Amino acid sequence: MSFPPPPNPPNFPNLAAIIAALTSKRYIHISYYCPPPMTELEALHLIQPIINTGGDWLRYTNNDWIVWSSWTPKQWYDKFAAMPQLNQCSILILRLDLSPENRAGQLPQWVWDWIQTPRT
């Protein structure tokens, strides 16, 4: 009795690209504004713990961060949206390209030093 050969395993040509995309880190910009009656300090106490979970970060103004993270802007937003206290806040989350040809501006030197720090 002969048996047919086993079927070929499925071909997933994009599997490596999908895995790389899920694990690759990128710069994310997070900015918020919470209107009164919430104070800036109250908002910060809600937002900073979320930022702290994401990896290396830089807070360069009262309500602006750059985060080095493997999370997408949508994943970040979902974390903020899960907090009902932030429903009235404006929250902007963007993926950044901080390569030298795509950045310019006036910031303190410590900000530029953080941006130029190699990360993997």
Image (tube, rainbow, N blue to C red):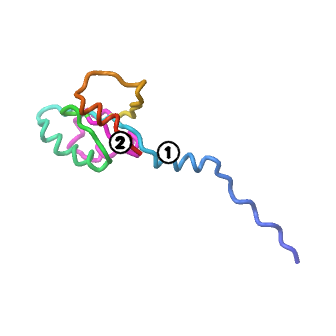
Please indicate whether residue 104 sits to the left or right of residue 59 in the image.
Answer: right
Q: Which mark is residue 68?
A: 2
Q: Is residue 5 above or below residue 30?
A: below
> Residue 21, labelled with which disc?
1
The residue that appears at 31% across and 45% down in the rendered structure is 56
Residue type pointed to by label 2 = Trp
Q: Residue at x 77, y 66 (%)?
A: 6
Q: Mark 2 near mark 1, Cβ–Cβ under 8 Å? A: no
Q: The N terminus lies in which quarter of the figure?
A: bottom right
Magenta residues span 65-92
Q: Residue furthest top?
A: 105
Q: Earlier in the sequence, mark 2 or mark 1?
A: 1
**How many numbered circles does the render carry?**
2
Identified at 17% across, 31% down, the residue is 35
Q: Does residue 22 show up magenta in the picture?
A: no
Residue occupying image coordinates x 34% and y 43%: 76
The reply, left or right, for residue 77 in relation to residue 35 is right
Q: Is residue 49 above or below residue 73?
A: below
Q: How many other residues sit within 10 Å of disc 2, few (<14), some (14-19) or many (≥20)?
A: many
Question: Where is residue 68 drawn, in percent x and y?
Answer: 35, 42
85 or 116, nearer to the observer: 116
